[in-house]
Amino acid sequence: MILLRKLLFPFAILYGFITSLRNYLYDKGILKSYSFDIPVIVVGNLSVGGTGKTPQIEYLIRLLSPNYKVATLSRGYKRKSEGFVLADANSNAEILGDEPFQYFKKFPNIQVAVDADRRNGIEQLVNQKEKPEVILLDDAFQHRKVKAGFYILLTAYGDLFSDDFILPTGNLRESRNGAKRANIIIVTKCPPNITESEQESIKKKLGVDLPIYFSSIDYDDKVYNDDAMSLAVNEIKSTQKILLAGIAKPKPFFDFLQADTDEIMVFPDHHHFSESEILTLKNKAKTKIIITTEKDFVRLEAKIFKTQLYYLPIKSKFVSNQETFDQIILNYVGTCTGNR
């Protein structure tokens, strides 16, 4: 795979030229960006997947929803619907995509919408009778047709964009210069005990004159099913079980839960499970419990016995300076809505 990526280097140069030209045309106004009279916050990355966008969107929902009418707008990756869809009681993971459906289930007081055309999606949201007061755009850093008011760029600890290269040789969707469009950078998935000296070293590596924050993944101490039942992680860690994940980088999930006797099942990110795969899973599990990620749970819950399937919740947790980050976001939204 590494050799193949090196052989594809000329295509990476071509891809980098095309994306840089596109960004130049947007920067100069030759290609038009559309802005809106409503706070719009983008959470995205330069690389392909695995930076923790979903827990960061959920962090913003928890921060903003007590005081504002919040809407999320996602592409709805691998959904089986088309165009603009606003989540309702008839929605599921196939209609919305797994991540938007996860938002819809966890946060019933917000609006959740999907549309590959983010401009159209925002227009649809703001023209509703129940208009949101702030819109969170999930994975839209490269969606230049919309000019958001605030950009949060994520890059994962141990996989910094400054150490990467353009697709297909590397994993970057555009050149590192794209980071300059951000208002804030968050280095995600850090060790909770990351030292200040290591933080300073990472800031120098990133090489951008922007506020940089550091966050870690905070795993729940329980796993849950859809009947509000829960099991303590420390009590089931040594129990024989199946651990299943269809996410970009599942190793930390497995490391947190795995015992020597566990069976591990790995699937591609956003994987839709076939009937034969479900049958194989049931045959492997028999009387064992199955623990999966929240994103996989919303795709599996209708296909596995409720008493057998559990998920492990996660949250984004700032290593330090959380209050400063929160205030920056609240000031931006408050200023735009005229409530401050």
Image (cartoon, helix red, strand yellow):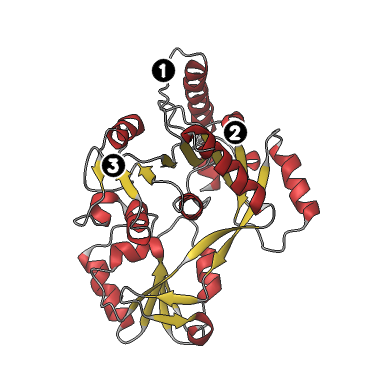
- First-in-chain label (1 vs 2): 1
The residue at 46%/55% (across/down) is 248
* Mark 3: amino acid: Glu
Give SS at disc 2.
Answer: helix
Q: Which residue is mark 2?
A: 179
Dot in front, 1 or 2: 1
Residue that carries the numbered disc 1 in the rendered image: 32
Above/below status of 315 relative to 76: below
**Is 32 on the left-hand or right-hand side of 191?**
left
Comparing 242 with 218, the one in front is 218
What residue is at 47 percent from the left and 19 percent from the top?
26
Mark 2 against mark 3, which lies toward the viewer?
3
Which mark is first along the chain, 3 or 1? Answer: 1
Return the residue found at the far left.
90
Q: Is residue 225 visible?
A: yes
Q: Is residue 128 left or right of residue 28?
A: left
Reading the image, the residue beneath label 3 is 130
- Report helix, strand or loop for mark 1: loop
